Every structure is written in structure tokens, then in C-alpha cells.
Amino acid sequence: MARSRLLPDNFTLYLIATVTLASLLPAQGVFADALAIATKVAVSLLFFLHGAKLSREAILAGIGHWRLQIAVVATTFALFPVLGWALSPVLRPLVTPDLYTGILYLCALPATVQSAIAFASMARGNVPAAVCSASASTLLGVVLTPLVLGLLLAQDAAMGDLLGAIGRIGVQLLLPFIAGHLLRPWIGDFLKRRTSVMKVVDQGSILLVVYAAFSHAVIDGLWSQLPLSAMAGLLVVCGVLLALVLSVTVWGSRRLGFSKEDEIAIVFCGSTKSLITGVPMANVLFAANVAGAIVLPLMVFHQMQLMVCAVLAQRYARRPADPALTAAEAAKA
């Protein structure tokens, strides 16, 4: 196990630096107003570019494996929320009310795309199915995330009007995504040749939203209201959720008779949660003064899932090669 796998990646360090900057120099006044506009533009651009990157061929290639796709959707939008809700008596006392709302929000989010596919590839899993599952999860999340969250929060006023929330997500996230995908035949190759630009837009948009969200939260007294015990409790809660979901997906995949390659796709697509989708969506769903606390569990879970899944992918990759697959590959050579 490489030691580097257990260290934060560069983007996580950027996130920490952004939260620190917002804590020391929060955006206020005219700058905060300009930042709000810039954030909306950046997020719309982010989803436009993600729509343009989405491969229709990859989706069609994986749709035929409907049992695997149902398993991933069920894990992402049913198992996670049920665990977050059912474990409320145990988890809620460990954190503050806003952090627990953030945990429920985390449970309702779609799967990550890049990380899930990368881990499935590293582990020698069913990569086409992983691409399909992760992409479909992002699209379904536009509608399912606010619906599931509305059920979890019930009478909680943190999210406001449910239909209004879905409408705002549709306008700010889904429409740019669809526009980007429709323009893919003309701009897809151009974007493929400029992956470094895409990475800057990806990470820059998220950092901008995080800075804006935490600026509001800091001004409203986030850190003065957040005891160290709650931060420690948050680490425990994220660890418990991740361990339970990984255990259930591994056990369930084997009980349902999936191949090892399919199991890998289910585990990595079902157990991960998208930071790139979750941070902008929180900015749309929640009031500015609570959005910072809401995304904090997601940021902690994001780093935890990267470290744990990297180790798990390495373990899968060390398994002996399937003789049947090896023979088939040799025959094609």
C-alpha cells in the first residue's frame, strides 16, 4: 500500500486553503454580491462542459446491463438515505443540527463520475458499466436528490420549497448540461484536446462556490458555533456510513451473483458521492447562511472515500486473472 494513497490529493489541499481563506477573509458587501453572480456563471459553465464531455456511446454500451444499473441506483438513492435516516438516533448526537442536515444531503447525492471510473479501471472492473452508472447517476440526481432530501428532511425548513428547488436546479444545472451535450458533436473533440482547461474549470468552479458558501457561514458564526467534538463526530459519522455502504455493496453483489468485474463497478459507483455535483447543488438548494455547514460533511466524506477506495481498488487489482478472460484476450491477439 503506497503511503501517498493515504495523503490528501492536491484538490483537497486547495479546498482546505479555500476554507481557510474564507475563514480569515470572508467575502462581504459589494464583493460578495459580485461573487454570487460569478459563482452562478461558473457553475453553469461547469455543467455545460460536463454535458459536452458525456459520451452517448458509453451510456448506450452500459444500459443493457440493467441489473447492475438498478443496483447502483438503489445503493446511491435508497441505501444511503435509509442509512442516514435509520441511524439518526446514533449519528445525530455526534454532530450539530446543520452538520446532520449536511449528512442527510450527502446521503441523497449522486455518485461521483471521474473517481468511480478511475477506481473501477484501476481494480480491473467493468469500466463501460461504471461509465454508464456514474453518468446516469449524475443526471438522475438533478431530480432525485431534491426529492429524496425532501423526504429525509420532512418538516425541516432548511431547504425551502421542493418544487422551487427542482426548478432552480433545472435552470442553473440541467439546462446548461443538456445544451453542452447537444453541442458535443461540434465541441467534444475540442474539449478532449484541452483537458487541462477542463480541469481548471472543474476545480475553479468548486473552489469559488466553497469560498462563497463558507464566507456566508463564517460571517454568521460557523466556527464559533461548531465545537471540536462535532468535528470529531463528523469524522466518525462519515467513516461509519462509508464502511456500511462498502460492506453492503460487496455482500449484496456476491449474493446476487454478479461477476467480480460487475461487483467492482457496483462498489465504486454505489459508495462514492460527487463533490463536483454536490457543492453547486447545495448552493442552489440551501440558504447562503447554512450552505457552508451543509457541504462540510461532503468535503470530509470526499477525502475519506478517495483514500479508502484507492486502497480497495489496489486489493481488487491484485486478484488472480480470470483464466477464461485471459484465454479470450489471447485469442483476440
Image (spheres, rainbow, N blue to C red):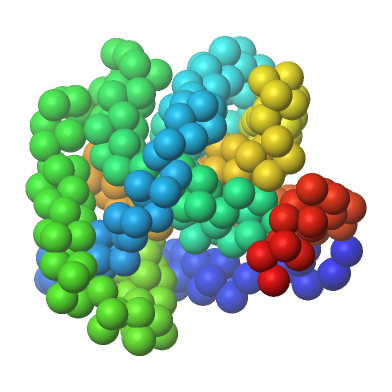
Above or below: residue 265 compared with residue 91: below
- Decide which of 286, 189 is in the foreground and name it: 189
Q: Quadrant of the N terminus?
A: bottom right
Q: Position of residue 147 (x, y in %)?
A: 28, 24
Q: Is residue 188 toward the left or the right of residue 210 in the image?
A: left
- Decide which of 24, 270 is in the foreground and name it: 270
Q: Quadrant of the C terminus?
A: bottom right
Can the viewer see residue 36? Answer: no
Q: Position of residue 306 (x, y in %)?
A: 65, 56
Q: Is residue 199 toward the left or the right of residue 163 in the image?
A: right
Q: Position of residue 56 (x, y in %)?
A: 30, 55
Above or below: residue 239 compared with residue 100: below
Residue placed at 79% from the left, 56% from the top? 327
Above or below: residue 241 compared with residue 58: above
Q: Position of residue 156 (x, y in %)?
A: 31, 19
> Which corner quadrant of the image does residue 185 belong to?
bottom left
Can the viewer see residue 327? Answer: yes
Above or below: residue 65 compared with residue 312: above
Number of numbered tags placed on the structure image? 0
